[in-house]
Image: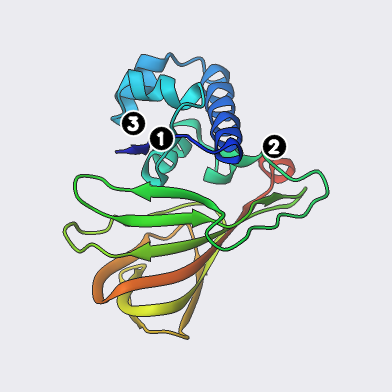
Amino acid sequence: MDTVADVGEDSHRGVAHSIGAQVRVARNKHGLTVAKVAEVTGLSSGMLSKVENGNAFPSLTTLHALSRVFKVPMTFFFETHQETQGCCYVKKDGGLFIESRGSKVGHQYQLLGHGVGKELSVSPYMIEMTDTSEVFPLFQHPGVEFIHMLEGAMVYEHGGKPYHLSPGDSLFFEGTTAHGPIELIKLPIRFLSIIIEPGPDDRSQR
């Protein structure tokens, strides 16, 4: 797992601090030490400390691993960083970039906004893929997901069934079933992903 550690702009630094605070809250709530969480997630204790202190952005893979350990949706980590007016405006190339690099992969996620209501939590991402050096992992998460292809071509799997996606194609599916790209046919690939999960009020009633 890797993290984007260079936190430069003030807006991005604020997001990093918000994410770090949520990670610390979840860790303390479960009574886990930094060392224990690092052991379970495969992240080093030093990097986890940097994430909690807002000095590093966790990658999407890291957030996914943390969400599984703490039993929360990935959007939980963004809940304290919301616009007070209930509106999130993101200029072109202005979203939070989260690069999932693994060993050699260059898949890039751009968080375009985030909103948490009483019943639903919504996170739209712009996802770009330009590297075929590693097989893309399959994901599972609460709620549903909508993806819309903008550029390139790929085979996307959901529940073991492959779907050939080209610009203009869409998929809407249950997030709890394993899903993700399994073959990158034409690069670069760019698609919009919108993840809709239960909001905090709904989670508290489970």
Q: Residues within 10 Å of mark 2 (few under 14, many from 20)?
A: few
Mark 1 vs mark 2: give the one in front.
1
Where residue 59 appears, as percent x and y from the top left, is 39, 42
Q: Secondary structure at mark 3?
A: helix
Going from N to C along the chain, the mark reached first, 1 or 2, is: 1
Looking at this view, is 203 or 57 the one in front?
A: 57
Q: Which mark is residue 41?
A: 3
Q: Which residue does the numbered mark 1 point to in the structure image?
A: 6
Mark 1 vs mark 3: give the one in front.
1
Within the image, what quadrant is residue 169 found in?
bottom left
What residue is rendered at 31% in x and 38% in y?
A: 2
Q: Secondary structure at mark 1?
A: loop
Going from N to C along the chain, the mark reached first, 2 or 3, is: 3
Within the image, what quadrant is residue 28 found in?
top right
Where residue 139 appears, as percent x and y from the top left, is 38, 54
Q: CA distance from mark 1 to mark 3?
A: 21 Å
- Residue 184 falls left or right of residue 17: left
Q: Secondary structure at mark 2?
A: helix
Identify the residue at the far right of this view: 85
Q: CA distance from mark 1 to mark 2?
A: 34 Å
Q: Residues within 10 Å of mark 1 (few under 14, many from 20)?
A: few
Q: Are marks 1 and 2 in contact (CB under 8 Å)?
A: no
- Residue 76 falls left or right of residue 27: right
Q: Which residue does the numbered mark 2 point to in the structure image?
A: 204
What residue is rendered at 64% in x and 51% in y?
A: 114
